[in-house]
Image (tube, grey):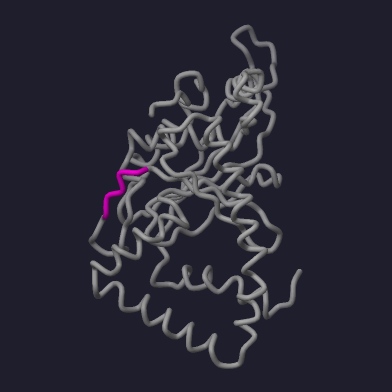
Amino acid sequence: MRDLKDYLAIRKPVIRRFHRRNCAPTVTIDMDVDIAPALAWKKKLESQPEARDAKPTFNAIVLKATANALRRHIFFNYDYDGRYGIIPNERICLRSPMDMGDFPLHIVVEDTDKKSVFQIAREYQENAEKARALIEKNLPKYLRFHRLPLLPRISGGITDLYRAIQPWVPPLERLAFHMSHKVIGTFMVTNLGSLGVTACHGQLVKPSIAALLVLAIREDVVYQPDGTPAIRKVLPLALEFDHKVADAGFSSRFLADIKKNLEDPENGCANRG
């Protein structure tokens, strides 16, 4: 754990995003996926020549399955201003946070639906390396600035004023949403499975309409038609959505499509560039 002042300086952008005026009435629905087909497909991909340059990861497969489902449920890729405005986003750019200890590093893969699993895995890794290098270079300067007595407060006040004005000037707010896509993409997929997390319900903030949580794979005992028990690998998925603009049925069909893509990855995760 770093110095508390430095830690809070790093968390300031997150704290601002979770201001009460940005938070949505969040509902979460859960669905289990038979993940054995996706794991088998991953092994198959690892034996292909492209794997020498970009090792296919499980996270890349989930991102591809989600991006392909978003093509059929593009509404969940849109921005919502928290009031009565929905702003379309035709490009599907998924973001997936990477654990960096005391703060997450957000990695965006642009046009995720148009890329193969190999391309997604490569771009994710390259963007993660670039982001790490950028943070290592700029973080000390950022922290030194926030240790100053007065300037950080002035800067924070200007930022808060800018955010407060945005809802009253819709074109400005839409421009801010558009500019944020380079940093936060258009849809978030958080993979907590590698940390062993088995359940998690989060809080949506605008402009997101929905976000996907990927949890730890577990083994369940299932009974086959002849009554004999068998072990099945299950991946729990949780979809958070803003209940102001989406209902459970609408959202469940989107989540079911992600599940379908993962259970039939040969077709569901095919490149549709």
On screen, residue 170 versus residue 37, left or right, reads left
Is residue 90 one of those drawn in magenta? yes
Q: Is residue 11 left or right of residue 252?
A: right
Image point (61%, 33%), residue name: 58
> Of 203 and 59, which appears nearest the observer?
59
- Where residue 134 appears, as percent x and y from the top left, is 61, 61
The number of discs equals 0
Q: Based on the picture, tell me whether residue 121 belongs to the magenta stretch.
A: no
Q: Nearer the viewer, residue 259 or 111?
A: 111
Question: Which residue extends farthest right?
Answer: 1
- Please identify the residue farthest to the top as the structure is shown: 226
Assign the C terminus to one quadrant of the image: top left
Q: Position of residue 229 (x, y in %)?
A: 69, 16
Numbered range of the magenta stretch: 87-91
Q: Give 182 or 229, whichever is nearer the viewer.
A: 182
At 36% across and 78% down in the image, what residue appears?
Answer: 162
- The x, y position of residue 265, in whole percent, is 51, 22
Instruction: Name the residue rendered at 55%, 93% in the picture.
Output: 150
Residue 15 versus residue 41 in the image, above or below: below
Is residue 110 shown above or below 155? above
Instruction: Assign the N terminus to one quadrant of the image.
Output: bottom right
Q: Is the residue 147 above or below the residue 114 in the image? A: below
Residue 124: percent from left, percent from top: 57, 43
Give the farthest residue toward the bottom: 150
Main SS, magenta residues: loop
- Residue drawn at (57%, 25%) of the image: 34
